[in-house]
Amino acid sequence: MNRTALLLLALVAFAYSLSVHEQFRAWMKEHNKSYSTPAEFSRRLENFKATIARIERHSQHNKQASFGHNKFSDLSAEEFANTYLMKKMPAQGLATSCLAHGITAPHYDVSDLPTSFDWRTKGAVTPVKDQGQCGSCWTFSTTGNIEGQNFIKTGKLVSYSEQLLVDCSKGCCNIPGYGDVCNSACQGGWQWNAFFDVVSWGGLETEDDYPYTSGGGTSGTCQMNNSLITGKISNYTCLSQGDGAAANEDQMAAYIMQNGPISIAMDAGYLQSYRSGIVDPWFPKLECDPTQLDHALLIVGWGVDTNIVGETTPYWIVKNSWALSWGEKGYFRIYRGANVCGLANAVSSAVI
């Protein structure tokens, strides 16, 4: 390569570096970010560059979702997982452990399911919440499910306390090959453990009575007030199969119609730079591992998207706990019918 070509390559690299630096400065201003040392700034800039590469890769490998910068863009993938997700657990083990207690899920006739259904339009879903820098997603999935159940029973939408679960729920389940896995505040937990605890407590306190304070990544001591307990549930059920296999997604839809939003878990690292659209990777097992789950969420409904040439894509509507500023106003859509990212491997619900 001659000197002229080398100089052009150097100029292109310099222009790219300058452009990324300017993008990062603009992103910092948009998200009100500042860093205390030049070393920290440099580290965050490198993470930002890695985010750009991830956005490009996901955009190329996904059929219908768009990816871009958001409040997580200065985090490495490892930091993001350690802060906002939970330790990955084997999907089959989770499905089996969920079935250790609770009652058998009903079987529904799915021959007449509507093409779309959304509990948000019926008043059964509270506003999107924010777990903050705490791996407490399991508590938001749990309360969202109970909130929907309570609405169907009483006609009133009550927001229940995630902080009560963070501080007080220490329930455990045995995961084959791993042993006991217990609810551990900001270090993670699972909804069926929480349901089991809520049954023993006689219910939950409301958000107003026991507000969320763990956004900074720390939990408190249990301060449950039995006189304020409402939101009673009698049991819980798991839609997972008896052999640890994924739940049938048509049965999931039928259960949602009859009983309200349901709690799920999935491999969610793929969502770090999600902006909008339907998560539908060309190579789903490479992009998000359905056998390793690390995030709890709430399915509130489903629908079908039709493109300009008439091709249809069925999707789930999923409520997240990363605030309104993330994704589609705190929600995302994901392909329905193929257990994408393992979303059907650990499906559970309270029973009132």
Image (cartoon, rainbow, N blue to C red):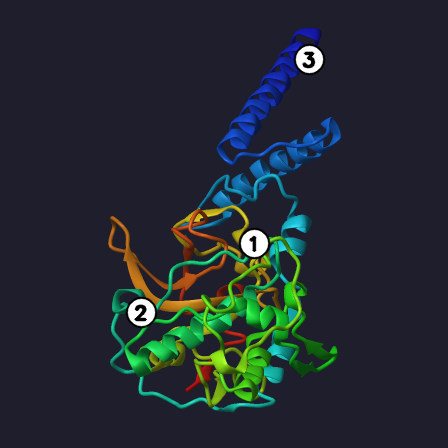
Q: Name the residue under label 2.
A: 119
Q: Which residue lies under the disc numbered 3?
A: 6
Residue 347: give x, y in percent of width and height. 50, 77
Q: In which quarter of the image is residue 97?
A: bottom right
* Label 2 vs 3, first from the N-terminus: 3
Determine whether label 2 and label 3 are within 8 Å by CB: no
Please name the residue shown 58% across and 55% down the image.
215
Q: Residues within 10 Å of mark 1 (few under 14, many from 20)?
A: many
Q: In this view, does 133 lie to the left or right of 112?
A: right
In the rendered image, is residue 291 in sight? no
Q: Disc 3 marks which amino acid? A: Leu
Three-letter residue code for mark 1: Gly
Residue 174 seen? yes
Q: Position of residue 208 (x, y in %)?
A: 45, 66
Residue 71 or residue 63, whichever sits in front: 71
The alpha-carbon separation of the residues under discs 3 and 1 comes to 47 Å
